[in-house]
Image (cartoon, helix red, strand yellow):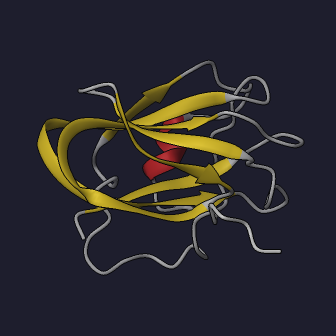
């Protein structure tokens, strides 16, 4: 049987510029040795990990920015560890999308200053190498 709520597709970036590069980032408690800056450095060998099996990370801009897709790239060795997640407009406190697994997440174009990826469940230790954002 097929899953009625499929997760994101393979992490193929949409066209355009990755808006996370040069933006800010923050989130919940992080595992030792990881950094929120690694979410937006363009380097797949560095990563952020929550202190536990769940947590959240955000990309933020100084001014309102239009975004319509996100790519969550898991670090090598942790592929498949992210289970359920929610993508939030942190300004409005609304859910933009939800699902299971890392990859490309598309949603209606939204203008915001901060977008948050919340890991609701995971297996093992989730590690995010990149939190890419695109205008679409």
Point out residue 36 in the picture as x, y percentages from the top left corner.
51, 35
Point out residue 72 in the picture as x, y percentages from the top left corner.
55, 57
| Of residues 29 and 55, the one drawn nearer to the viewer in this rendering | 55
**Is residue 83 placed above or below 6 in the rendered structure?**
above
Q: Which residue is at the far right?
A: 124
**Is residue 37 placed above or below 20 in the rendered structure?**
above
**Is residue 6 placed above or below 51 in the rendered structure?**
below
Point out residue 25 in the picture as x, y percentages from the top left corner.
40, 34
Point out residue 65 in the picture as x, y percentages from the top left corner.
15, 48
Quadrant of res 59: top left
Residue lying at 64% horizontally and 49% vertically, measured from the top left: 128
Quadrant of res 70: bottom left
Quadrant of res 102: bottom right
| Of residues 63 and 122, the one drawn nearer to the viewer in this rendering | 122
In the rendered view, does 30 fall on the left or right side of 113? right
| Of residues 39 and 83, the one drawn nearer to the viewer in this rendering | 83
Residue lying at 83% horizontally and 40% vertically, measured from the top left: 125
In the rendered view, does 132 fall on the left or right side of 104? left
Residue lying at 69% horizontally and 57% vertically, measured from the top left: 101
**Is residue 67 placed above or below 58 in the rendered structure?**
below
In the rendered view, does 62 fall on the left or right side of 6? left
Residue lying at 53% horizontally and 40% vertically, measured from the top left: 86
Q: Which residue is at the far left?
A: 63
Q: Which residue is at the far top?
A: 29
Q: Quadrant of the C terminus?
A: bottom left
| Of residues 124 and 33, the one drawn nearer to the viewer in this rendering | 124
Q: Quadrant of the N terminus?
A: bottom right
In the rendered view, does 102 fall on the left or right side of 87? right
Q: How many marks?
A: 0
């Amino acid at each position: 049987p097929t899953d009625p709520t499929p997760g994101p597709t393979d992490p193929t970036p949409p066209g355009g510029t990755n808006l996370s590069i040069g933006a800010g980032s923050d989130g919940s408690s992080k595992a030792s040795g990881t950094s929120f800056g690694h979410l937006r450095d363009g380097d797949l060998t560095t990563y952020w990990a929550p202190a536990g099996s769940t947590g959240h990370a955000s990309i933020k801009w100084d001014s309102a920015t239009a975004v319509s897709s996100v790519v969550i790239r898991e670090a090598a060795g942790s592929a498949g560890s992210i289970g359920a997640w929610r993508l939030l407009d942190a300004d409005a406190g609304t859910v933009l999308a939800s699902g299971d697994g890392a990859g490309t997440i598309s949603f209606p174009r939204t203008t915001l200053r901060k977008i948050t990826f919340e890991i609701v469940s995971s297996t093992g230790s989730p590690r995010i190498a990149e939190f890419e954002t695109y205008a679409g």
